[in-house]
């Protein structure tokens, strides 16, 4: 019963945590528009694989991170640098290529590695899963139950993939809107990164 509760809470927490527009899910959407449904699905798979390890790191460090503000600030500052870089990157890319380009929609394994890279750059899941693990008291004891840790990792990954798959289905089906999205997607991603920069700054200095 405890295992089922842990799985369900973690699954839906991960699902809901990824639903709002963010770096990973909007990359999935952008890939669906430019390279087709299968490549978008591969990006989602790659990102979900990385979430397994992010959840493991989070659950092992949950107690330590919340007892050590320095570690939390290092994570936030790392995220800040990444988001500033990505803001500049997407803006420059948008300015250079405002016209639509023809992209191959043949599915390939590179999309999996793309999803993994984007997920690695997105450091927010670690403190998010840390908070969840602390709330569930999974990593609060000295002696770890590895079966619960594995269940936590699996639920986090599956919840993330389910949410990303919703993006794949949604952006695959709105064919009449994809041209406009493709044209302005880099501007949208740059604006999104700027918002994440502001949020991260607020978390560093005020929370």
Image: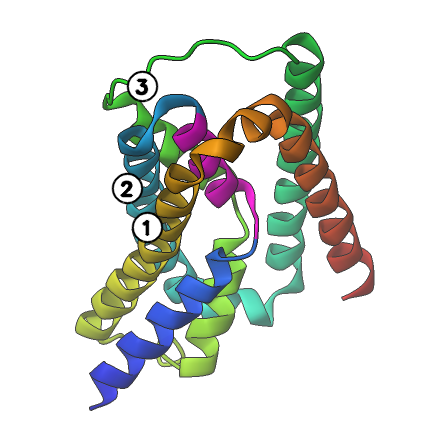
Q: Which quadrant holds residue 158?
A: bottom left
Task: Of the two numbered discs 3 and 2 on the same chain, state the one appearing first in sequence.
Answer: 2
Q: Tell me: residue 111, above or below residue 106.
A: below
Q: Identify the residue under disc 1.
A: 53
Q: Tell me: residue 83, above or below residue 137.
A: above
Report the mark closest to the observer, 2 or 1: 2
Q: Would residue 102 be seen by someone viewing this image from the given angle?
A: yes
Name the foreground residue: 19 vs 171. Answer: 171
Q: What predominant SS class does the magenta segment belong to?
A: helix
Q: Which quadrant holds residue 39?
A: top left
Q: Is residue 166 left or right of residue 158?
A: right
Please give the range of residues in magenta: 21-33
Q: Residue at x 53, y 60 (%)?
A: 127
Q: Residue at x 34, y 44 (%)?
A: 50
Residue 92: give x, y in percent of width and height.
70, 16
Q: Residue at x 37, y 22 (%)?
A: 35
Task: Of the two numbered discs 3 and 1 on the same chain, state the one appearing first in sequence.
Answer: 1
Q: Is residue 154 left or right of residue 164?
A: left
Residue 198: give x, y in percent of width and height.
78, 48
Q: Identify the residue under disc 2.
A: 45
């Amino acid at each position: 019963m405890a295992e089922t509760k842990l799985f369900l809470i973690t699954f839906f927490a991960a699902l809901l945590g990824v639903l709002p527009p963010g770096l990973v899910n909007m990359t999935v959407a952008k890939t669906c528009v430019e390279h087709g449904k299968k490549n978008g699905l591969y990006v989602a798979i790659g990102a979900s694989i990385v979430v397994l390890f992010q959840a493991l790191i989070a659950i092992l460090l949950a107690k330590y991170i919340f007892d050590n503000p320095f570690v939390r600030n290092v994570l936030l500052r790392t995220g800040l640098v990444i988001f500033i870089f990505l803001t500049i990157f997407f803006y420059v890319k948008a300015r250079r290529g405002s016209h639509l380009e023809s992209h191959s929609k043949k599915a390939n394994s590179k999309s999996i590695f793309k999803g993994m890279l984007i997920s690695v750059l997105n450091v927010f899941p670690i403190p998010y899963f840390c908070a969840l693990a602390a709330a569930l008291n999974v990593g609060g004891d000295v002696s770890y139950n590895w079966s619960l840790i594995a269940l936590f990792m699996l639920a986090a990954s599956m919840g993330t993939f389910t949410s990303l798959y919703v993006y794949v289905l949604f952006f695959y089906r709105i064919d009449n809107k994809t041209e406009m999205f493709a044209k302005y997607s880099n501007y949208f991603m740059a604006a999104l990164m700027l918002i994440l920069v502001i949020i991260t700054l607020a978390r560093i200095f005020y929370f």
